[in-house]
Amino acid sequence: MAEKEHIAVLLDEKRVFKPSKEFVEKTNVKKWMDKHGIKTYDELLKKAEDYEWFWGEVSKEVVNWIEPPRKILEWNPPYANWFVGAKYNIVHDALDRHAKGDKKDKIAYIFEGEPGDTRKITYGELYKEVNKLANALKKLGIKKGDRVSIYLPMIPELPIAMLACAKIGAIHSVVFSGFSALALRERINDCEAKAVITCDSFYRRGKKVPLKKQTDEALEDAPSVEHVIVYRRTGDEIPWDEKRDLWWHEIIKDMSDECETETMDANDPLFFLYTSGTTGKPKGVIHCHGGYAVGTAVTLKWVFDIKDDDIYWCAADIGWITGHSYIVYAPLILGATSIIYEGAPNYPNPDRWWEIIEKYKVTILYTSPTSIRLFMRYGEEWVKKHDLNSIRLLGSVGEPINPEAWIWYYTHIGGKKCQIMDTWWQTETGQFCITPLPITPLKPGSATKPFPGVSADVYDNEGKSIKNAGGNLVLTHPWPAMLKGLYKADERYRQTYWSRFKNTYLAGDVARKDDDGYFWIQGRADDVLNVSGHRIGNSEVESALVSHEKVAEAAVIGKPHELKGESIVAFVVLKKDVEPSDELKKELREHVAKQMGKIARPDEIWFVADVPKTRSGKIMRRLIRAKVLGQGTGDTSTLANPDAIKELEKAK
Ligand code: WTA
């Protein structure tokens, strides 16, 4: 049967993929269920509705408090305090405990650089490196509560820098290395970072990306920064400011490899991570030591079933939440061995990933639908060159996985023997929220059910729970790794997530729940794009365009894209007397890349005379999108400028 027909049949059949009994028996979650006399998956979900009992109980499996909590949860909507009164530091569980115990010589990270250089770092070695840097940071005057921006690529120094900050109680703010100097500047200034940690440059697709140069550009206007710590990755010549810049290797040279871990409150901030929202300014999502440790470690232990001999590879970038939670903190807490790969997935050839899996005998692979679609396009030949038999479990994150990609992943990467964990979650949730467990029967394209102890639902606009129809995805009870607000933006926090339904978290996604209670995530409900699994605010791209001297106004929409999920389409109104041209389109695309980073570069730019707006001046992106996709635009009488719709047809 041809692959396409095969998929159609599978979808028609609504086939359910059940894990084998033998596999289920050996899972971490099943063992926990046995210990607690829980027989079935449904019973587990039911039992975990006693949220405080559940999270209190499972926390014992993954964290060791310095002082135990007085109370599991204190819920003063919209702020939750988990593990109230506990004294803790996540580094204690992620590192200190292993380095002093039987995992000292176990490998924490296997690093593979793009040019092919490799390093293996044990827990004992990681501990020493973190301590040396932590001592150096202290010597520079960085204290508990200070913010440090980290602008590093996928090299082991990125987790080392994060852990060093956390160890001394400083708050890290990692900025994705694919972001531009200006995006970095905005994030540094928002959190008023005292120091920035970066590197000279790094390898990407055979070229070198000049991070230090970009950092310097960001720092042209970032008054809070006193020190820049530079790790030498490539040995490139770089600009240097004697008063401000310090080499990583020099400042750690004379430092002790022991450093006391600062005792924190479980609810003290661990990091900020900026994410896109519906306004032009990124939001600084706050996560804390205690609840975040429990939420991420328990979910990883159960969903990806991490065992002592696994070689686990989460192929995301640490610059995003997926990497924070599931490359750095949770795997380290579980004492796992993880892969860190520096480069592009298809460099030098489209089988680089398969080569890595074969080389290190990776057992668990966690990636995004956009990467799967990229590999699908290259074809199975590249996969077949390698033995991927070591893989026992697969994962997906970032966007809805289309059933074609699901089946391809299942067949060609998993050899039809591995369950796929389609994990739905967000920067804000910190941990998986809707996700299968390895014991869950799967339906391709569905993230299945909420993780035990997480309460999700689909509401209509009146706040009524609905089935078999698209509605607002909500979380109706706090969960441990839940964000602790947005940095310096309480009102925005309340407005964005909590104003729509009382004491209920609005995720901003559209979803449908079927008769079996399975969730089917359909995409964002708000004006946020999802390009290759990354969140980009429409209005951020618009402000980037409008910051160009020749642009008067811009409206940005997402259009379905085979590979990237969504592509960015911009409608641009030029200033008076500016001539439209193809060169100008190119210039504008580069301008956005410079302002925000390459991932935000528009795929298409169209020049128009006007863009449709409401009377209050809000750009009607939904209408533009409907028009572009050839759907009906409905009633346009509320527009301030109904003719603008017709103008779109004349776009050049
Ligand atoms: C989308 C990434 C469908 C969703 C962890 C969410 C998904 C946004 C899935 C968060 C999934 C993430 N199925 N959609 N399995 N996982 N999303 O903050 O729209 O970068 O709101 O966190 O990605 O993106 P973020």
Image (cartoon, rainbow, N blue to C red):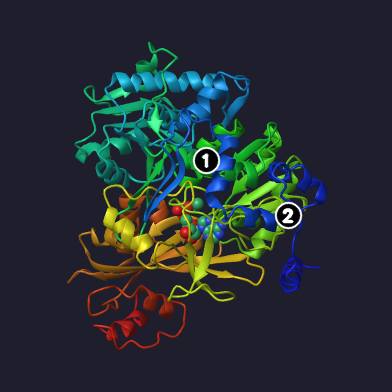
Residue 61: give x, y in percent of width and height: 60, 36
Q: Say which element carries label 2.
A: loop
The amino acid type, in three-letter code, at marker 2 is Thr
Q: Work out which quarter of the rendered image holds the C terminus and state it.
A: bottom left
Residue 518 position, x and y percent, is: 63, 65
Q: Is residue 347 visible?
A: no
In the image, residue 619 above or below residue 275: below
x and y, in percent, of residue 606 in the image: 35, 71
Residue at point 46%, 20% (across, down): 129
Give the labeled residue for mark 1.
294
Of the pair 49 and 333, the residue shown nearer to us: 49
Q: CA distance from mark 1 to mark 2?
A: 23 Å
Amino acid type, label 1: Val
Q: Is residue 476 left or right of residue 446?
A: left
Q: Position of residue 216 (x, y in %)?
A: 27, 35
Q: Are marks 1 and 2 in contact (CB under 8 Å)?
A: no
Above or below, 33 against 514 in this view is: above
Q: Front-most of 433 and 573?
A: 433
**Left-right relation of 380 to 22:** left
Q: Of callouts 1 and 2, which one flags the residue occurring earlier in the amino acid sequence?
A: 2
Mark 2 sits on what residue?
40
Neighbours of disc 1 within 10 Å: few (<14), some (14-19), many (20+): many
Please state, as top left, top right, bottom left or bottom right, where the N terminus lies in the image: bottom right
Q: How crowded is the residue under tag 2: few (<14 C-alpha within 10 Å), some, or many (20+)?
A: some
Q: Is residue 508 visible?
A: yes
